[in-house]
Amino acid sequence: MLDFPGMSIKGIVFDLDGTLLDTIDDLTDSCNRILKQYGFPEHPAGAYKKFVGSGVRNLVERALPESIKKFSQLDEFILQFREDYSVHCFDKTRPYPGIMEMLERLHNRGIPMAILSNKPDAETRSIAARYFGTELFKRVYGHREEYGTKPDPAGAKAILAELGLKGEEAAFVGDTWTDMQTAAATGCLAVGVLWGFRDRQELEENGAQKIASDADDLFSILMEA
């Protein structure tokens, strides 16, 4: 690990959707295809920006009509959505502008990085490998049975332990309230980003200590932390 003057952060945990990758169109298309099969109303991408962030089950329940939130085929719907998304998750998804360059700069400085997502673990690993390869991130965690979804801090704590870091030595970067609360629960520096799925107010109300407007801004925040 390299040291830089004035830099106290020794590791970084990133959220995936809405932080590193713009996944909203593929998520929207997959869920809408299944909704259409059932004859349920579809939603625009802007609505899905509010639906995502708390795991697949919560996404699906938010997408379903209020009158049938508990409908008996919920598990089947979730399975169909996941199958569709696994086929189409690379259709429109792309890294946000400047993200690849920023990650390379951090990697070249020897800063260990990880991903923690509320996507299922297998999907998270597959998508991360597709867009980022296998060298940039020391750990890639999606939702696993042994850990709750964010903001449950168990996954983040496991990653930090594997990296040999204390919470106060790391930054947690994300775009939603779940990420900011996860950061707080692990003692990490909470860094929010404005290009994702939620707004500044949500980030600030949930404990964001720093907020980045673009990838260059995020790099500067992390280097100065």
Image: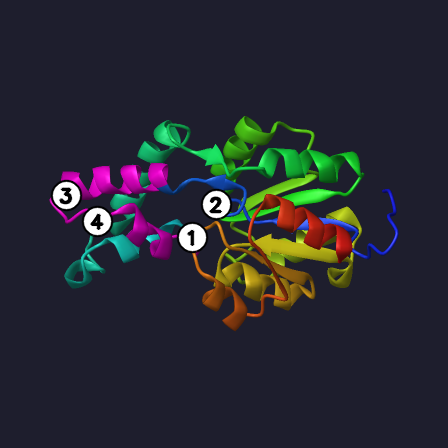
Farthest residue in the left direction? 39
Real-space CA distance between mark 2 and mark 1, rounded to the nearest whole angstrom: 8 Å
Which amino acid lies under the numbered mark 3 shown in the image of this protein?
Tyr
Real-space CA distance between mark 2 and mark 3, rounded to the nearest whole angstrom: 26 Å
Q: Position of residue 126 (x, y in %)?
A: 51, 31
Q: Which residue is mark 4?
A: 73
Q: Which residue is mark 3?
A: 38
Q: Is residue 187 visible to us here?
A: yes
Q: Do the numbered discs 2 and 1 sit on residues whose CB atoms are within 8 Å? A: yes
Which amino acid lies under the numbered mark 4 shown in the image of this protein?
Gln
Real-space CA distance between mark 1 and mark 4, rounded to the nearest whole angstrom: 28 Å
Real-space CA distance between mark 3 and mark 4, rounded to the nearest whole angstrom: 10 Å
Q: Do the numbered discs 1 and 4 sit on residues whose CB atoms are within 8 Å? A: no
Which amino acid lies under the numbered mark 1 shown in the image of this protein?
Phe
> For residue 65, what is the image quadrant?
bottom left
Q: Position of residue 61 (x, y in %)?
A: 29, 56
Give 159 or 193, whichever is nearer the viewer.
Answer: 193
Q: Earlier in the sequence, mark 3 or mark 4?
A: 3
Q: Do the numbered discs 3 and 4 sit on residues whose CB atoms are within 8 Å? A: yes
Q: Earlier in the sequence, mark 2 or mark 3?
A: 2
Q: Which residue is mark 1?
A: 197
In the rendered image of this protein, does residue 221 appear above or below residue 202?
above
Q: Earlier in the sequence, mark 2 or mark 1?
A: 2
Badge 1: how crowded within 10 Å, few (<14), some, or many (20+)? many
Q: Which residue is mark 2?
A: 17
